[in-house]
Each structure stands twice: as structure tokens, then as C-alpha cells.
Amino acid sequence: MKRLVAFLTLVTTGLLSNPALASVLENLRNDLTVPEHCRTTHLADFDQNALMIFTVGPMGGSERGFDYEYPLLREHASWLFRALHGEGSKSEWERKIRQYPHLWEDYTILRRHHMQRDFHFEVEGEVLELLAIIHMQRQLDAKNSGLYVSGSVEYHGNHQQNTIGELDMIVGDRINCQIVAYGEVKLGLGSLSKARAQVRRFFNFLHNMGLNPHWDAPDDSWFDEAFNQDRYAQRSIEQVSGM
């Protein structure tokens, strides 16, 4: 019902009277983990009193000002990308990844989930994007939140060819599909200003489209946990397991 009310609100305010405005969002991935009735994101889904807005960076990101950080080094993201993308000798990259047990765990997670999430690793940044999505989903599932985490939603101007930007992450309600949060993921520690500019651009876009959400600060419990500080101790899986 809330989804219908939001849609009717946009109609009555004239936002959907122009057919071009009805398709200002485009889901670039067919994420099968999202409830089927929520796989097409609509402008009306963002019609909230408040939206939680966040940025995600790699290891060291919190010290640089990112709201969340995932414990992944930039160099190791490149290793994962090359192994997943089949660049060079896959066995060589897998051998390097195996030196770090938690990095091998990340590699296993990416291999297990990328098809269902429709990730094809065209650029290195998608490695961190998918890990961030999966990690946040696990945190929210542990809280029985009833929320799904997805991403890769492109938004356009009045003409669909005019792409303004893309949302790396969105968080929505599994029942009514209402979006409660969105965020930007950057693999480079020096990209915080760009990440902030991008989440601000979409916030301004919503207001320009007639929506008026407030900007909510991130909830630490949605992402952070006690990651192993020895994550990158260079020990082989065989050594860790005593084999």
C-alpha cells in the first residue's frame, strides 16, 4: 500500500505525468537475490522522510573519512580481479591469494555469489562493490531487518540517454520495495571526495525531482564488525589449518 501511495503522490505532483520521468532509473544488473517484485527500482521508492547515505572504502578508509571500510587492500583487490577475470595465469593469482586465508575467503565468496548477483568484474572496483554488498547483507540478515542490499542503479535526466550517475549500493524493504539507504563504493583511498560528491549528486537529483528526504547518518551496525586484525598475516591456508 505504501508503494502505491508513493506512486500516486508522484502522479498528483506531476512528476510522472511526463513519460520520460517515469523511467529515470535503470537497474543495470539482474540481481536474483532481490525479491522479484522489487527488481525494478522506481523513483517513488525513494519517497521517504529520510534516507541513510553512506560511503564505503577499502582498508584504511575509516581513517580517511569513509563511513564504512572493508578490510581489503588495493593490491589484493587487483589480485582478486585478475583471478576472477581470467587475466594471465589464473593458478598463479590463486596461489598468491592463498597466502592470505581471509583473502582466499573473499575470493570464495566472490566466486559463489557473482553470478546470482549478475557481477562480471569488468573493472577492479566491482570486487569491492560486491564484497561490500554481501557483507552488509549479512549484517542486516543477522539483525532480521527484512531489508535487501543490491546496487548498480543508473539515473538519468529528462531524456534517458542523459546519464547523470549510478548508485553502487541501495538498501530496500523486501516487502514494499521502499529504498531506505544508498551509498557509493570506492576502491581508492584518495577517492573520498568523489564518493561524497556522487552521493550528494543523487540527493540533489531527488530534490530536483520533487522528493524531499532528509539526509540520515550511517548506522555503524549495518556494516562494521570486529574484523581480524591479523587478516593479512602472510600464512598459507595449510599452515593455519596445521596441514
Image (cartoon, rainbow, N blue to C red):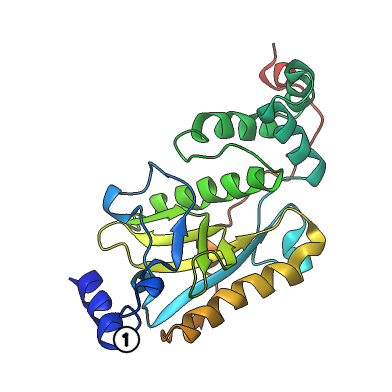
Mark 1 lies on a secondary structure that is: loop
Q: Nearer the viewer, residue 11 or 153?
A: 11
Where does label 1 land, which residue?
A: 14
Amino acid of disc 1: Gly
- Relative to 24, is 184 on the left or the right? right
The front one of 1 and 8 is: 8
The part of the image, by quadrant, that contains residue 98 is top right
Q: Pinpoint residue 149: horizontal percent, then vertical percent.
A: 45, 54
Q: Is residue 145 above or below residue 227?
A: below
Quarter of the image with the N terminus is bottom left
Farthest top residue?
243
Q: Position of residue 15 (x, y in %)?
A: 35, 82
Where is residue 54 drawn, in percent x and y?
58, 68
Viewport quadrant of the C terminus? top right
Residue under the point 58% across and 36% down: 120
Q: Nearer the viewer, residue 111 or 11?
A: 11
Name the residue: 64% across, 46% down. Answer: 126
